[in-house]
Amino acid sequence: MPAKLTNSPLVLIIRDGWGTNPHPEHDAFNAIKLAQTPVADRLMREWPNTLIKTSGEDVGLTEGTMGNSEVGHQNIGAGRIVDQDAVRITKACRAGLESNPVLDAAVSRAAAENRAVHLMGICSDAGVHGQLEHLYAVLRLCKLRRVRRVFIHLFTDGRDTGPFTGKGFAEQVERTCEQIGIGRVASVVGRYWAMDRDNRWERVERAYNLLTGRGEVAPNFASAPEAIQAYYDTPEGETLAGDEFVSPRTVGNAEQSRITTGDTVIFYNYRGDRPRELCSAFLLPHFYGSDEIKPSPDSGERGFDRGPKLELDFVLMTPYSERLAELAKVAFAKPPKMIDIAGEFFSRLGRTQFRCAETEKFPHVTFFFNDYRDEPFAGEHREIIQSPKVATYDLKPEMSARGVCDAVLARLNADDCEDLIVVNFANGDMVGHTGNLDAATKACAFVDACVGEIVDKTLDRGGSLIITADHGNAEQMWDPQADSPHTAHTTYDVPLIVVGNTFKGARLRGDSDPAGWFDAGVRSRRGRLADIFPTALDMLGLEKPDAMTGRSLLVV
């Protein structure tokens, strides 16, 4: 067994959605400022801290694009800036998708065999899960190849965008269809139903039935904006208002536009976690009751009765999972796996690691942190805590943070405690997305208390910690320009705190002045997410591998 590392165990705490808002005039709707956070306040006073960048080109996205949990955790785990799918797909779209062999073949087959082409995905400009620019590029390809029937199925956002912006995006889609001269919107449904990632199969079933014409007949409307406005006027519940929750509804002739055997389907989202469940319903040979399907936390059911499997020409924009990539065609394959990422490097040294989060963020500390690898590395142990059974997380702002905290404390109390612990607290992000300021304030306070317990236990056994975030969210809960709740991530920098008896009085690169946000020179000297793991290795007395181009934030 390798000798104990200096300052180990090292605990990396990711307070998801915990950013620093540089605008004092936003303090009245800054949940982090409003929350009782004595632990964070004390840590910022007593331990080295700095601000780091989590958006745009600093995480491999286009300039000005807000970061997200998938991108953030991948950058942290890689220890380098990772060029993201969105950037390379956008370049391909602007060059013309006729040069993409998978998409061109699928569309050309549909044209030659008079198949209907169905395009489905997120309807927003946020750039977190997909982009309308990519939808429009596929439409232009369909026009070029003379496809006769093209139907668009829009999944309204309201989570990474303002909660009532979907109608405007739908109007844009309908205008663009007219300009290109092809396609029509056939259905609209909120991402709450179509893009669930928490095994809530009851939600996914409603989206699947809408797309395939099964089950209860959805209300029909003459246009997509009309369908969305009707939901704004009569939402399904008090906490289910806005784009995210738009209930299934058809547009135009529903008989003509449902997905049937022989059709071509292109899912234009590029981020992998949220298309998986809906794609599984379409693609798995055996779905309902299959061991491949995790049970619903509400009903215990593994999937739902989808009826006979539809035989489709199904294209995924990216490989949403290794299993789904086996069952469908993939338009943009992932680049080769990166070498010497955090988990792999630690494993090769014979060291152990523990990853923990609740359901909503578990893929992020495992699959995304490990550069899209499903299987753990040798010595990598995992524990998932079930997220609570509520419609929206403002109804339970503490979520499952208590269970996550207890799982980490159990490992810190164990004789065989791992050398590295990576833990995500989802509350700031998931409750922040609801736009409920009071709930987000409670969420941040609860996370703060959990962090305090982990800090105390880690220091008791001679370990060290890095406390940070993957992106911001809860620090801005209101959009003063739109005069409505702010439910999206922010592009603001996030705090990073180094804690450990060896690091009292240490200096970190960058600065911790919120006002530095407004000074390009100051921000250029700040670190980024890619610097977190090189910092962790530095704290443990380990040399980082050459492939990790991030730099330690510790100033020698």
Image: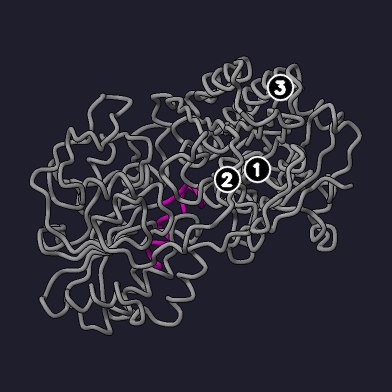
Q: Which residues are magenta?
A: 157-172
Q: Nearer the viewer, residue 174 or 526?
A: 526
Residue extending farthest to the front is: 1
Residue 458 numbered mark, or none: 3
Q: CA distance from mark 2 to mark 3?
A: 35 Å
- Residue 460 is situated, as x and y percent measured from the top left of the image, at 75, 16
Query: In the rendered view, would you say 402 is above or below 48?
Result: above
Residue 486 numbered mark, or none: 2
Upstream in the sequence, badge 2 or badge 3?
Answer: 3
User: Type of residue at label 1?
Assistant: Gln
**How dense is the environment of label 1, judged by Cα within 10 Å: few (below 14), some, or many (20 and up)?**
many
Residue 191 seen by the camera: yes
Q: CA distance from mark 1 to mark 3?
A: 31 Å
Label 3: which secondary element: helix
| Left or right of residue 132: residue 34 | right
Label 1: which secondary element: loop
Instruction: Report the residue at 71% width, 44% height from top.
Output: 494
User: Type of residue at label 2?
Assistant: His
Instruction: Report the residue at 23% width, 61% height from top.
Output: 314
Dots 1 and 2: beta carbons under 8 Å? Answer: yes
| Left or right of residue 66: residue 551 | right
**How dense is the environment of label 2, judged by Cα within 10 Å: few (below 14), some, or many (20 and up)?**
many
Residue 414 sits in quarter = top right
Q: Nearer the viewer, residue 225 or 451?
A: 451
Label 2: which secondary element: loop
Upstream in the sequence, badge 1 or badge 2?
Answer: 1
Instruction: Report the residue at 37% width, 47% height from top.
Output: 191
Marks 2, 3: nearer the viewer: 3
Residue 168 forms part of the magenta stretch: yes
